[in-house]
Image: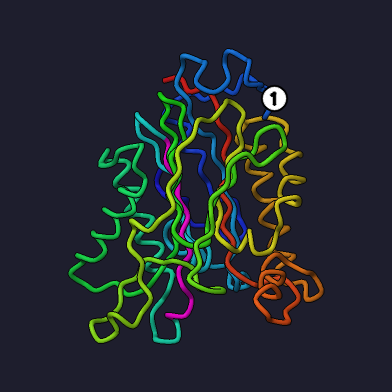
């Protein structure tokens, strides 16, 4: 789909247009399919698709700014559909570039919009999400007008025919797959050292070799089967730094069906709770715990941009 229409920060990302490409039907209670159900996993003969909704907050949410495309602060995201796969991604622009007069959201936003365009044009292989990142990053490097900045990135691809999910995660954004109320798959966070995630970067010539820059090939890549009713949550670190798994799972329990409105409401609830906790000075957040583990005396949430994409695996019919 085209990245969401402009809306105030905190407003759910309007991803309903993804449904116009076909009819998605979830024929099972969420997470209720067992391995022995003939429709579970690869047992069903039909294609799978994702019903996805999103929500987010910019760190400086009072400005109420949502730049062109689906961006919350320096975060960016996309949801795109191709006949072979559903693809989505999130990216978190590195805020330190602002000290050098560079808008960090330009890099993350352009990276995600480029990924979206590649998917719509069919210039990707579902089993190779790192390829989507690599091609997008190379296009940014080849821009006639230099685009400076850095960003983490997480790409999730559902191959609708094979019923397999293929992922690529570079840095500390990431995803969870929840089945039967439990996390059955999750991305691995990539950090060079505390609070310094792996990232794609483009630096001015005089700073090359000084600015931290990782290759798209360094992304952690996984592939696994999914089942009807599986819940996939993809988000930037603003969520995971402020909400531990058990809190996220509590919110997901409220998701009783797979219609878009229900998913959107749950995505908003998760984003709002993370945003509230981010500004609680007395809360021992996952980020604060991680800081303490690294010898820092820190307490409270971590104010940050927050982007949440919430998806349900459903049957897909043209």
Please report the bounds of the magenta region as a residue range: 86-97
Q: Check residue 301 for magenta coloring.
A: no
User: Which residue bears the numbered disc 1?
Assistant: 32
The part of the image, by quadrant, that contains residue 124 is top left
Of 283 and 113, nearer the camera is 283
Q: Residue at x 38, y 68 (%)?
A: 106
Of 149 and 127, nearer the camera is 127
Q: Is residue 298 above or below residue 159?
A: below
Q: Is residue 142 left or right of residue 19?
A: left
The image shows residue 142 at horizontal and vertical percentages of 19, 65
The image shows residue 58 at horizontal and vertical percentages of 57, 67
The reply to whether residue 78 is visible in this rendering is no
Q: Is residue 197 above or below residue 221?
A: below
Q: Is residue 195 above or below residue 259?
A: below
Q: Is residue 227 left or right of residue 119?
A: right
Q: Check residue 90 for magenta coloring.
A: yes
Q: What is the quadrant of the C terminus in the image?
A: top left
The reply to whether residue 77 is visible in this rendering is yes
The part of the image, by quadrant, that contains residue 284 is bottom right
Q: Residue at x 44, y 58 (%)?
A: 170
Q: Residue at x 41, y 31 (%)?
A: 159
Q: What is the quadrant of the N terminus in the image?
A: top left
Q: Residue at x 33, y 83 (%)?
A: 210
Q: How many marks?
A: 1
């Amino acid at each position: 789909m085209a990245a969401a229409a402009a809306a105030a920060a905190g407003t759910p990302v309007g991803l309903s247009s993804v449904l116009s490409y076909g009819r998605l039907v979830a024929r099972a209670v969420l997470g209720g399919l067992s391995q022995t159900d003939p429709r579970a996993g690869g047992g069903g003969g039909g294609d799978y698709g994702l019903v996805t909704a999103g929500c987010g907050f910019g760190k400086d949410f009072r400005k109420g700014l949502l730049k062109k495309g689906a961006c919350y602060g320096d975060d960016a995201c996309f949801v795109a559909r191709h006949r072979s796969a559903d693809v989505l991604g999130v990216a978190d622009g590195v805020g330190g570039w602002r000290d050098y007069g560079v808008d960090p959201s330009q890099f993350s936003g352009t990276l995600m919009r480029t990924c979206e365009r590649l998917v719509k044009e069919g210039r990707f292989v579902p089993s190779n999400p790192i390829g989507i990142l690599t091609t997008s990053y190379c296009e940014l490097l080849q821009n006639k007008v230099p685009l400076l900045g850095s960003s983490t990135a997480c790409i999730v691809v559902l191959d609708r025919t094979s019923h397999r999910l293929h992922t690529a995660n570079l840095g500390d954004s990431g995803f969870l797959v929840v089945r039967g109320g439990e996390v059955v798959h999750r991305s691995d966070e990539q950090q060079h050292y505390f609070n310094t995630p792996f990232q794609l970067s483009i630096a001015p010539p005089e700073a090359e070799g000084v600015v931290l820059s990782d290759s798209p090939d360094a992304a952690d890549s996984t592939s696994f089967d999914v089942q009807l009713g599986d819940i996939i949550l993809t988000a930037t670190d603003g969520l995971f730094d402020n909400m531990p798994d058990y809190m996220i799972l509590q919110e997901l329990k409220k998701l009783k069906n797979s219609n878009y409105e229900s998913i959107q409401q749950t995505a908003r609830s998760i984003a709002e709770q993370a945003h509230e906790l981010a500004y609680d000075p007395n809360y021992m957040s996952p980020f604060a715990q991680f800081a303490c583990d690294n010898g820092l005396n820190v307490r409270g949430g971590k104010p940050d941009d927050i982007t949440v994409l919430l998806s349900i695996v459903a049957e897909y019919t043209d």
